């Protein structure tokens, strides 16, 4: 694992992502990532794992490896833990560093763009109460990520990434964008449920069972 002085690490988040990819070890261990982002808080870890789910989630098995830590992060945000804890077996899980580099190429330019525009604002959206609520939403979204749904990882991962970036930068406006995404998912689920239930009811009545 890398041996950085994370307490005094002032590199931009995008630079940390690039430095991780530059390592020669072909295996990128989960423990290395927790070590790299631990001092930057839950936000950085949520952003990282969310981005990786977007970038390489299509590879079989990666959504489980990358989604499980998000589930634990959400639970620990809900209970106001100061630092992420993961079991030792989870820290030993790994993905190919080559796959990481490939995924990073897709998301890094946009990360740098948003990084330049972001600043601390709307502090109420990154308060302790807000963090608990974000934890609840992250748990629900992480469950969706872990499920073997083809293409179902994109929207939840994007929302989690948005929450993570907002928390990391203390940018309440970004957090608001994340909550707008959650609202959109809820509306979609409600509309889909209404349409499906009405279709089943119509078929039920047509068969003379109602």
Image (cartoon, rainbow, N blue to C red):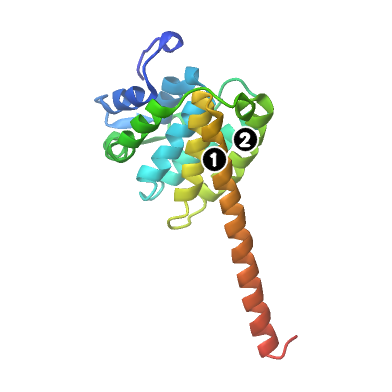
The residue sitting at 41% across, 26% down in the picture is: 33
Residue 37, percent across and down?
45, 22
171 left or right of 109 in image: right
Within the image, what quadrant is residue 105 found in?
top left
For the residue labelled by badge 1, is the local secondary structure a helix, a strand or a loop? helix
The residue sitting at 31% across, 32% down in the picture is: 27
**Residue behind mark 1:** 178
User: How many numbered marks have been drawn onto this rendered protein structure?
Assistant: 2
Identify the image quadrant of the N terminus: top left
Residue 83, percent across and down?
57, 21
**Residue behind mark 2:** 135
Q: Could one spot residue 155 in this view of the protein?
A: yes
Residue 209, percent across and down?
73, 87
Classify 89 as above or below 65: above
Within the image, what quadrant is residue 48 found in?
top left
Relative depth, front residue between 176 and 71: 176
> Closer to us: mark 1 or mark 2?
1
Residue 124, percent across and down?
64, 27
Q: Could one spot residue 69 in this view of the protein?
A: no
Pointer 2 local density, CA inside 10 Å: few below 14, some 14–19, many at least 20: many
Relative depth, front residue between 29 and 183: 183
For the residue labelled by badge 2, is the local secondary structure a helix, a strand or a loop? helix
Relative depth, front residue between 58 and 121: 121
- Are discs 1 and 2 less than 8 Å apart at CB? no
The residue sitting at 35% across, 44% down in the picture is: 56
Identify the image quadrant of the C terminus: bottom right
* Sequence-first tag of 1 and 2: 2
Classify 169 as above or below 63: above
Structural distance between the alpha carbons of marks 1 and 2: 12 Å
Pointer 1 local density, CA inside 10 Å: few below 14, some 14–19, many at least 20: many
């Amino acid at each position: 694992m890398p041996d950085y002085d994370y307490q005094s690490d002032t590199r931009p988040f995008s630079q940390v992502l690039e430095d991780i990819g530059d390592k020669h070890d072909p295996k990128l261990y989960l423990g290395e990532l927790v070590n790299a982002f631990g001092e930057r808080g839950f936000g950085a870890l949520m952003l990282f794992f969310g981005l990786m789910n977007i970038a390489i989630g299509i590879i079989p098995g990666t959504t489980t490896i990358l989604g499980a830590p998000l589930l634990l992060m959400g639970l620990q945000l809900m209970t106001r833990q100061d630092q992420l804890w993961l079991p030792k077996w989870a820290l030993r899980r790994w993905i190919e560093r080559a796959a990481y580099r490939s995924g990073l190429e897709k998301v890094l330019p946009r990360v740098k763009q948003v990084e330049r525009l972001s600043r601390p604002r709307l502090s109420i959206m990154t308060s302790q109460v807000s963090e608990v609520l974000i934890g609840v939403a992250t748990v629900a979204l992480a469950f969706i990520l872990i499920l073997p749904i083809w293409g179902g990882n994109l929207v939840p991962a994007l929302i989690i990434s948005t929450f993570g970036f907002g928390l990391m930068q203390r940018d309440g406006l970004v957090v608001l964008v994340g909550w707008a995404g959650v609202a959109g998912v809820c509306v979609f689920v409600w509309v889909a449920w209404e349409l499906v239930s009405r279709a089943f009811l119509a078929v039920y009545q047509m068969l003379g069972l109602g």
